[in-house]
Amino acid sequence: MSQGTDNGAVAAAGGRTMTGKVVSAKMQKTVAVAIERMVRHPVFGKYMRRTTKLLAHDEAGCREGDIVSIVECRPISRRKSWRVAEILQRAEAQ
């Protein structure tokens, strides 16, 4: 009956995690991340690429073109309820 379990740390880490590419970093502390998924056509069976664009809170300083991991969190604004967990790959400098 110990009171100090690690369940609180797991719950604080958040829910779903997704990986995507930063397509816009023009806002303050906010980035737009494009998530790509493959969906099978119901009649023809061909796989199609579908893109979802999510807004994520960015404290890490992401740039456009970075591959990032985002995690679900509490709603920060009307459209922003994800935050950048880590930058997986930096974009090449131009």
Image (cartoon, helix red, strand yellow):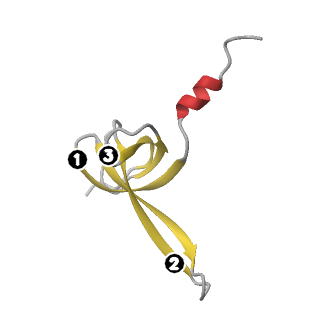
* Callout count: 3
Amino acid on which disc 3 is placed: Arg
Q: Secondary structure at mark 1?
A: strand
Tell me residue 41's x, y (percent).
57, 81
46 to the left or right of 64: right
Tell me residue 47's x, y (percent).
56, 79
Question: Which residue has dot 3 on it?
Answer: 78
> In this view, which residue lies farthest toward the top?
2
First reached walking from the N terminus: tag 3 or tag 1: 1
Amino acid on which disc 2 is placed: Met
Q: Nearer the viewer, residue 64 or 27?
A: 27
Question: Which residue has dot 1 on it?
Answer: 27
Q: Nearer the viewer, residue 63 or 55?
A: 55
Q: Secondary structure at mark 2?
A: strand
Amino acid on which disc 1 is placed: Met
64 to the left or right of 84: left
* Distance of label 3 from label 1 (alpha carbons): 15 Å
- Asked whether the beta carbons under mark 3 and mark 2 sit within 8 Å of each other, the answer is no
Q: Secondary structure at mark 3?
A: loop
Foreground mark, 3 or 1, reads 3
Q: If the image is split into quadrants, where does the N terminus sit?
A: top right
* Residue 14 drawn above or below residue 6: below
> In this view, which residue lies farthest toward the front?
78
Question: Which residue has dot 2 on it?
Answer: 48
Tell me residue 75's x, y (percent).
39, 40
Foreground mark, 3 or 2, reads 3
First reached walking from the N terminus: tag 3 or tag 2: 2
